[in-house]
Each structure stands twice: as C-alpha cells, then as structure tokens.
Amino acid sequence: MSGPYFFGLHEGKLSAREVRRRTQIAKRHGAYRYVQIERAGRDGSWYGWFETANLGAPWDQRVASAVLREVFDRRTNQGE
C-alpha cells in the first residue's frame, strides 16, 4: 500500500484541546494522529482528518471504526 489512509474527514475548526484529544485517541488505536488545517486562499474554512498506515482491508476499517467510536462516545466526550 502507498501513502497513509485518511478517515473521519471533518469540516470546521476544533479547539486545540479537542485536536489533542483526538490525536490521543488515534494513537491508542494504532493510528498516527488527527490533522487540522485551514484551507489557504479560501474563506477561512477548516478541515480535519485522521491518518493511519494504509495496510488495506480489514485493518483500515477496524482502526477507523475504533477511533471514531471512541471520539463520539458520550462518556469519552464528558471526560468520564
């Protein structure tokens, strides 16, 4: 496989704290990190996504599912 596998594309700016939280979650599941950028030359729109090794199916889907499940888990979002 070539290049990283990207998943969980998000439009909108997140706080630095949320970016760190998402990166920590990603690393717990073997992914690289969460990336957030401001799209240059545009209207100041922000985008974010997760990156992991591109090892093909079923690895990619398993990592993406685990990371996204934890990111959107209510208990994780509430700091419990």
Image (cartoon, grey):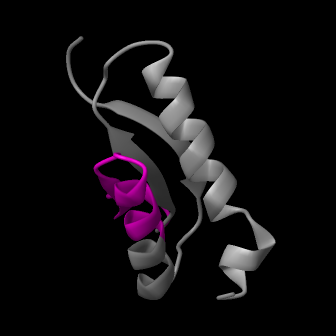
Q: Quadrant of residue 26?
A: bottom left
Q: Is residue 75 above or below residue 43?
A: below
Q: Residue at x 54, y 38 (%)?
A: 64
Give left or right: position of 4 versus 58. Answer: left
Q: Position of residue 39 (x, y in %)?
A: 38, 57
Extreme left residue here? 2
Q: How many marks?
A: 0
- Magenta segment, which residues? 22-43
Using the rendered image of the protein, determine whether residue 61 is visible from the camera's viewpoint: yes
Q: Nearer the viewer, residue 34 or 14?
A: 34
Give left or right: position of 43 versus 80. Answer: left
Q: Is residue 65 above or below residue 4?
A: below
Q: Residue at x 71, y 62 (%)?
A: 72
Indicate the quadrant containing the N terminus: top left, top right, bottom left or bottom right: top left
Q: Position of residue 74 (x, y in %)?
A: 79, 73
Q: Is residue 21 above or below residue 70?
A: below
Give left or right: position of 45 versus 4. Answer: right
Magenta stretch contains residue 54: no
Indicate the quadrant containing the C terminus: top left, top right, bottom left or bottom right: bottom right
Q: Residue at x 63, y 59 (%)?
A: 70
Using the rendered image of the protein, determine whether residue 42 is visible from the camera's viewpoint: no
Q: Quadrant of residue 62?
A: top right
Q: Position of residue 2 (x, y in %)?
A: 20, 15
Q: Position of residue 75 (x, y in %)?
A: 75, 77
Magenta stretch contains residue 26: yes
